[in-house]
Amino acid sequence: MPIAIENEYASYKLIDGILYVTYARDVILDLPAAVYIVKERLSIHEGLYLPVLCDVRHIKEVNKAARSYLAIEGSILVKAVAFIVDSPVSEMLSEFYLRTNTPTIPTKAFSNFDLALKFLNSYK
């Protein structure tokens, strides 16, 4: 049975062992937002390690404190992360995040949804 939660920053859906996180349009992430997002995400995990698909196409901005927090605390109970990007802005944000924060788990950016799922399915 799918589990779903939504707040002002993102929506979260657990479907077939993959957690889908879709960020809200034009959202700006600072440290308090990042802390809240991780807290909400962890409420879905129920202690299980899961692969996570993050749709970051509509994020407007992520500040340094939020990026640092998400790179470390955001990896709790996560097996792997696939970012979905499309616009030059979302692609730039994900590339910058990957280059400057060095996530502790396998993390890749994809413009193709099916390739992202294929990557994550190998971590189920």
Image (spheres, rainbow, N blue to C red):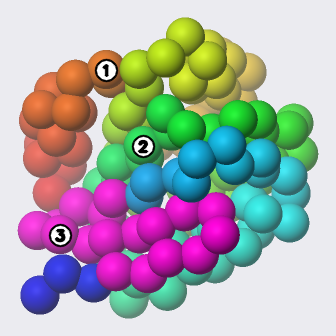
- 3D distance between C-alphas at marks 2 and 3: 15 Å
Type of amino acid at the residue the image marks with label 1 = Ser
Range drawn in magenta: 4-20
The answer to whether residue 12 is seen in the rendering is yes
Q: Quadrant of residue 119?
A: top left
SS label for mark 3: strand
SS label for mark 1: loop
- Where is mark 3, residue-wise? 15
Q: Are marks 3 and 1 in contact (CB under 8 Å)?
A: no
Q: Position of residue 35 (x, y in %)?
A: 76, 68
- Where is mark 1, residue-wise? 111
- Where is mark 2, residue-wise? 55
SS label for mark 2: strand
In the image, taking residue 46 as reference, residue 37 lies left or right, namely right
Q: Residues within 10 Å of mark 1 (few under 14, many from 20)?
A: some
Q: Residues within 10 Å of mark 2 (few under 14, many from 20)?
A: many
Mark earlier in primary sequence (2, 3): 3
- 3D distance between C-alphas at marks 3 and 1: 20 Å
Q: Which residue sits at x=87%, y=36%?
A: 64
Mark earlier in primary sequence (1, 2): 2
Q: Which residue sits at x=70%, y=35%?
A: 60
Residue 53 counted in the magenta span: no
Residue 10 counted in the magenta span: yes
- 3D distance between C-alphas at marks 1 and 2: 10 Å
Type of amino acid at the residue the image marks with label 3 = Ile
Q: Position of residue 58 (x, y in %)?
A: 55, 38
